[in-house]
Amino acid sequence: MAVSEVYLIRFLVQATEDAQDALQWRSGESSEFRAEVNGVRLGLFHVHSVDGSHLCLRLSNGEDRTFIEEPRSVSIFGGRYRTEEERSLAESMQALAECVARQCAHRNTRAWDLRDSIREGLYRQVLFGTR
């Protein structure tokens, strides 16, 4: 039985939100978020075109690569999709983008608040081999 795209995206949302062992996303170049899980590199980014912007998730491990793209709405104002599965995938990808952005923003805010202690710890590690 094949694994559905919606199931995979929901797994990533849960893994990102999990307080115990969260999937750690990092801000990359060109507004791309990157992570790695079980040896698979992930990239979440927006694709811009004439008819708008949509999310795309890249999965790769070495030479193998695949993409999951957010379905495009059939309505000018959004919210209408061809099938229920497309709607569910679009909502799941939006949820993933939101929780990834929250995670990265929280980490950046925390790093800014702790910048002096982080700097001091890194200096000590370089100089003395301990934090």
Image (spheres, helix red, strand yellow):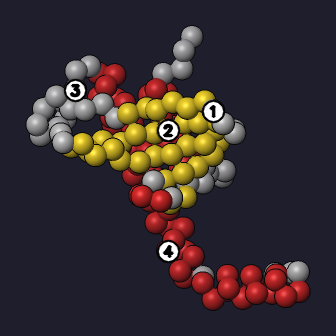
Pointer 1 or 4: first along the chain: 1
Toward the front, the furthest residue is 63
Query: Is 116 situated above or below 2?
Result: below
Towards the viewer: 57 or 94: 57
Q: What residue type is labelled 4?
A: Thr
Tag 2 and tag 3, C-beta contact below 8 Å:
no
Count of numbered circles in the view? 4
* Residue identifier under label 1: 63
Which one is closest to the eye, mark 2 or mark 3? Answer: 2
Q: How far apart are marks 4 and 2 (CA)?
A: 27 Å
Pointer 4 or 2: first along the chain: 2
Question: Image quadrant for the C terminus?
Answer: bottom right
* Residue identifier under label 2: 58
Q: What residue type is labelled 3?
A: Tyr
Q: Distance between the residues labelled 2 and 1?
A: 13 Å
Q: Residue sitting at 29 percent across and 21 percent down?
A: 84
Q: Which amino acid does label 1 sit on?
A: Glu
Q: Distance between the residues labelled 3 and 4?
A: 37 Å
* Residue identifier under label 4: 109
* Residue identifier under label 3: 81
In the drawing, does residue 32 fall left or right of residue 22?
A: left
Give the secondary structure at mark 4: helix
Pointer 3 or 4: first along the chain: 3
Q: Residue sitting at 12 percent across and 40 percent down?
A: 77
Towards the viewer: 90 or 51: 51
